Each structure stands twice: as structure tokens, then as C-alpha cells.
């Protein structure tokens, strides 16, 4: 999945777009897989999210400098299983419990990965399992995040300009951030029109979720800077690790779940 733009300082055109084809090829493989699991729902979506949570736990343990990465991955797998078997509330309790336990066992930084990856993962599970609007809600979130990522990537490289947060992520620009906001909100409004929803409400919800997703991208960049790595891993060619691709989802999904929980009568998350 394409990520928020990390625009380098002005260079020849070939250098600025050197990763475009690899990133596109990876997206053409993973994008349809994600959409298929989303459409099928049920076990396909559950397994897709479960694999992602395990991968995130493994990556976070490596970022935390743990020699053995699988114990933390196992913690995320347990949270996934508890959520599916006992429900979303039990999943939240499991996140809190295992975060506190992991603090004692693995250390503070390693334990921070439990709520970071866990809340986003179980929120995606809960959203898709909503009886009447699960598919629409989760599709809305995915379109908004992908619109944010693609819009920021393309607009940032085409326009460039002042840096958004040079000390955290020198490549990101204000033009890319604003482009991502606008394109993601338009994607949300388009889905609302297609489903006979309220496009104005969806546009606003898309802006909010996009803003939170971009905050998640900056947060992940700050974490990588803290531990001194360029990418969270090498899982996806041209994209880095799972955290590099899912950072926006991890912060926006809990908010999307909260918005959806506030809606009554089978309404979509944007109202």
C-alpha cells in the first residue's frame, strides 16, 4: 500500500521517482488481497488481520531490540483470539492487561507496541463485524487511508515545497499533507454518494480520519528516528515493514470504531 510522501530534497526526476515502480508492484499484489478479504469478511478478514497483528508484534520486538521477537508477536495473537472469541470489550481489556504485563516482562518500550498495534487491530476486526454497515464502514476507512497515502505521495512529489516536520520526517511536505487530506475526504464523499449516504458528512469524517492517520505516520517516523532505523522492517518490497504501511490505520481505526459506536440504527460511521 503506498505510504505518505517522503519527498527527498530536489533531485533529478529519476531519483525522485526511483521507488515508484517497486511500490506500485507491491501495491498491486497486496491491494487486491486486502480488498478480497474485506469483501469476503468472516474468516478471511479475521485471518488477514490476525497475520497482520502477529507481523506487527514481531516487527515491534525487533525495533525494541528484543533478541526473541515471537513472544511479543504471541501476545498480539492472544489479543486477536480473545477479541474474536469474547468480543471487542474483552479485546480492549486484554490490550490493557497484556500491555501492563509486557511492561514488567519486556520493558516499557516493548510494551508500548501492545496498545499501539493491538487497538488498531481489534478495531478493524470490530468494524468489519458490524452487522449492517461493517463492509461500508471498513471500506470507508480503507479508502480514506489509501487516499491519504496516495494523495500525499503524488502531490508531495509533484509539488514539493516546505517541509512538514523536518526534525521528525524530513521528506514530508505541507503540500503532500494537504493533498492527502483533500483526496482522502473526496474518496469518503464519493463512497457516501455511491451508497446513498451523506457526502458532506462523509467529507468531514474523511478529513478527520485523514488528519489522525497523518499524525500516526509522523508518530511512526518519530519512533523510527528514536531507534535509529529507516524502515520498521523489510516485509514489503519498496515499502519497508508493516508499521511503515499500517501506521495510519493503527491510529485512525480506533477513532473510526469510536465514530461507528456512536451511530445508532445501522448508520454508517459518518452519520
Image (cartoon, grey):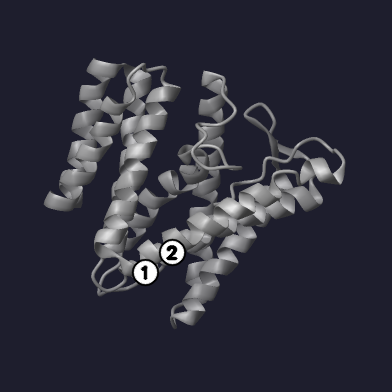
The circle drawn on residue 180 is: none
Q: Is residue 112 left or right of residue 217?
A: left
Q: Position of residue 58 (x, y in %)?
A: 36, 31
Read off the residue under disc 1: 39
Q: Position of residue 225 (x, y in %)?
A: 57, 24
Count the marks: how many?
2
Outermost left residue? 86
Find the distance from the CA under tag 2 to the CA under tag 1.
Answer: 6 Å
Residue 230 visible in this rendered orientation of the protein: yes
Position of the C terminus, as image quadrant, is bottom left
Q: Position of residue 48 (x, y in %)?
A: 34, 53
For the residue pair 92 and 110, the one nearer the viewer reads as 110
106 to 123, vertically: above or below: above
Q: Which residue is at 30% across, 60% downward?
A: 44
Q: Is residue 216 left or right of residue 175?
A: left
Q: Which residue is at 24% across, 32% downward?
A: 75
162 to 126, vertically: above or below: above
Mark 2 neighbour class, 10 Å CA radius: few under 14, some 14 to 19, many 20 or more: some
The circle drawn on residue 35 is: 2
Q: Is residue 185 left or right of residue 166?
A: left
Name the secondary structure under disc 2. Answer: helix
Residue 141 visible in this rendered orientation of the protein: no
Outermost right residue? 12
Outermost bottom residue? 196
Q: Which residue is at 45% across, 24% downward?
A: 63
186 to 219, vertically: above or below: below
- For the residues bearing labels 2 and 1, Cβ distance under 8 angstroms: yes
Amino acid at each position: 500500500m503506498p505510504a505518505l510522501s517522503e519527498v527527498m530534497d530536489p533531485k533529478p526526476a529519476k531519483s525522485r521517482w526511483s521507488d515508484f515502480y517497486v511500490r506500485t508492484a507491491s501495491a498491486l499484489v497486496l491491494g487486491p488481497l486486502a480488498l478480497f478479504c474485506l469483501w469476503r469478511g468472516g474468516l478471511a478478514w479475521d485471518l488477514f488481520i490476525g497475520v497482520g497483528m502477529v507481523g506487527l508484534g514481531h516487527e515491534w520486538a525487533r525495533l525494541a531490540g528484543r533478541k526473541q521477537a515471537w513472544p511479543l508477536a504471541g501476545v498480539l495473537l492472544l489479543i486477536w483470539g480473545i477479541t474474536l472469541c469474547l468480543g471487542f470489550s474483552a479485546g480492549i481489556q486484554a490490550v490493557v492487561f497484556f500491555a501492563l504485563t509486557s511492561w514488567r516482562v519486556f520493558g516499557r518500550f516493548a510494551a508500548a507496541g501492545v496498545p499501539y498495534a493491538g487497538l488498531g487491530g481489534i478495531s478493524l476486526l470490530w468494524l468489519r463485524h458490524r452487522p449492517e454497515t461493517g463492509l461500508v464502514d471498513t471500506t470507508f476507512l480503507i479508502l480514506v487511508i489509501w487516499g491519504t497515502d496516495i494523495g500525499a505521495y503524488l502531490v508531495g512529489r509533484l509539488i514539493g515545497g516546505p517541509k512538514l516536520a523536518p526534525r521528525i520526517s524530513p521528506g514530508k511536505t505541507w503540500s503532500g499533507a494537504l493533498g492527502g487530506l483533500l483526496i482522502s475526504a473526496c474518496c469518503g464523499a464519493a463512497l457516501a454518494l455511491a451508497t446513498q449516504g451523506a457526502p458532506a458528512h462523509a467529507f468531514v469524517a474523511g478529513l478527520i480520519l485523514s488528519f489522525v492517520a497523518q499524525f500516526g505516520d509522523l508518530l511512526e517516523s518519530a519512533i523510527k528516528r528514536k531507534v535509529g532505523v529507516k524502515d520498521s522492517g523489510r516485509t514489503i518490497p519498496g515499502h519497508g515493514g508493516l508499521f511503515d504501511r499500517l501506521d495510519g490505520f493503527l491510529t485512525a481505526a480506533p477513532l473510526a470504531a469510536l465514530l461507528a459506536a456512536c451511530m445508532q440504527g445501522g448508520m454508517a460511521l459518518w452519520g
